[in-house]
Amino acid sequence: MTERGNSAPLALDRADARVKHEAGIGGAVRAFLDRVRSGDLGSLPVIVGLVVIWTVFTSLNPVFVSSSNLVNLLFDCSTVGVIALGIVCVLMVGEIDLSVGSISGFASAMVGTLWVNQGWPVALAILAALAFGALIGSLYALLFNRLGMPSFVSTLAGLLAVLGMQLYILGSTGSINLPYGSALVDFGQLMVMPKWVSHTLAAIPGLAMLVSGLRTFARRRAANLSTPSMAGLILRVAALTVGLELIVAYLNQSRGIPWMFGLFVGLVVAMNYALTRTKWGRSMTAVGGNREAARRAGIKVRAIYLSAFALCSLFAALGGVLAAARLASASQQAGTGDVNLNAIAAAVIGGTSLFGGRGSAYSALLGIIVIQSIASGLTLLDLSSSLRYMITGAVLAIAVIVDSLARRSRASHGRA
């Protein structure tokens, strides 16, 4: 009786010691490898791909990693990146929007027409363009929810209709120049953060990680559970903070961090919080994973689809406004070409699944950096734009293949 009574606490002590050991740095590495083996790759493939792309272009032309070129890259990432953020929303629920390019082009034309030709205040013109985007997305959701029209068909029809509206309001001139020196154009072309602002913002992610880690540490200790390694937490916080501060210091050697890119990153962070920490975000994932199961669980599926389509079109309109600010004009070419495909490709390359139920707001950020890095590198090498399309297509195909293999690995791991 006595031996049995002593053996149980001894076993518990050993188990607790093992949990504490696994909570350290080595445990974090083992947990990461376990996630990879189970098919949960996260952002690993795109980060590896980005390192390869940057290494190749830097070896071919060192100007690629110059601070001035990277600042221009950040400016260029912001416009299509915001559109890609909306694509993440519809992909999360397993749908697609093919009209984001046309909506962005019409939004830019709408701002030019109302502001320059009609004399509206620029803020009111921007709000009208954003409202139009949200209205178009709501119409797609209505067609999907009430009539069962596939999103591929409705948004393809919207692509043609909105493009026609863009050509109509621009008229025979075909373009409208936005006033140089205006706040909107300066925002898209010139405005950068003061150095102290950029360094302060670079310290915030590490501070947030530290606060979150300390709260987790306190809650687990209060519940008498094993606690993560404090040394591991401090090491991660230090690595993140030092890394971001060094990047900011390097970019500040040129013009600095663009405010437009700061807006893009702010939207990414806000959407990441909404998708991961709110009931709405969990509902988005559930609907994308299994619509019928989500309905049976009490989720308002139609409302989720409405929010996804409306947000997608809203972000597309905002991207169009930023593109107009970047180019200082609204023209018939705005939103055409590869804008549509690049926005969708950025979301998929960044890690959002085409099959629904899995994705991240950071997919838009990582994916558009990959695409713009390819474009910038080929431009510096003075190579044909045809290569950019071929390379981007190959990267997109690889991203979809990786996603399919990861889904298969997760399914087999779940059955095991």
Image (cartoon, helix red, strand yellow):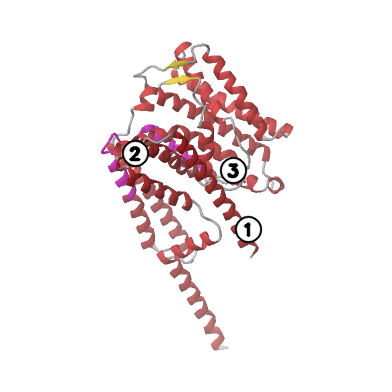
Real-space Cα separation, disc 3 to disc 1, in angstroms: 18 Å
Q: Counting residues from the N terminus, which is met first, the one under dot 3 or under dot 1?
A: 3
The residue tagged with tag 3: helix, strand or loop? helix
Residue type, numbered disc 2 = Leu
Magenta stretch bounds: 243-271
Real-space Cα separation, disc 3 to disc 2, in angstroms: 30 Å
Q: Residue at x 45, y 21 (%)?
A: 123
The residue tagged with tag 2: helix, strand or loop? helix
Mark closer to the observer (3, 2): 2
Pinpoint residue 222: horizontal percent, then vertical percent.
Answer: 47, 62
Residue type, numbered disc 3 = Met
Mark closer to the observer (3, 1): 1
Left or right of residue 169, residue 303 in this image: right
The residue tagged with tag 1: helix, strand or loop? helix
Pinpoint residue 164: horizontal percent, then vertical percent.
Answer: 59, 19
- Decide whether residue 145 is among the magenta residues: no
Find disc 3 in the rendering and name its residue: 92
Residue type, numbered disc 1 = Ala
Find disc 1 in the rendering and name its residue: 411
Q: Residue at x 30, y 36 (%)?
A: 68
Q: Counting residues from the N terminus, which is met first, the one under dot 3 or under dot 2?
A: 2
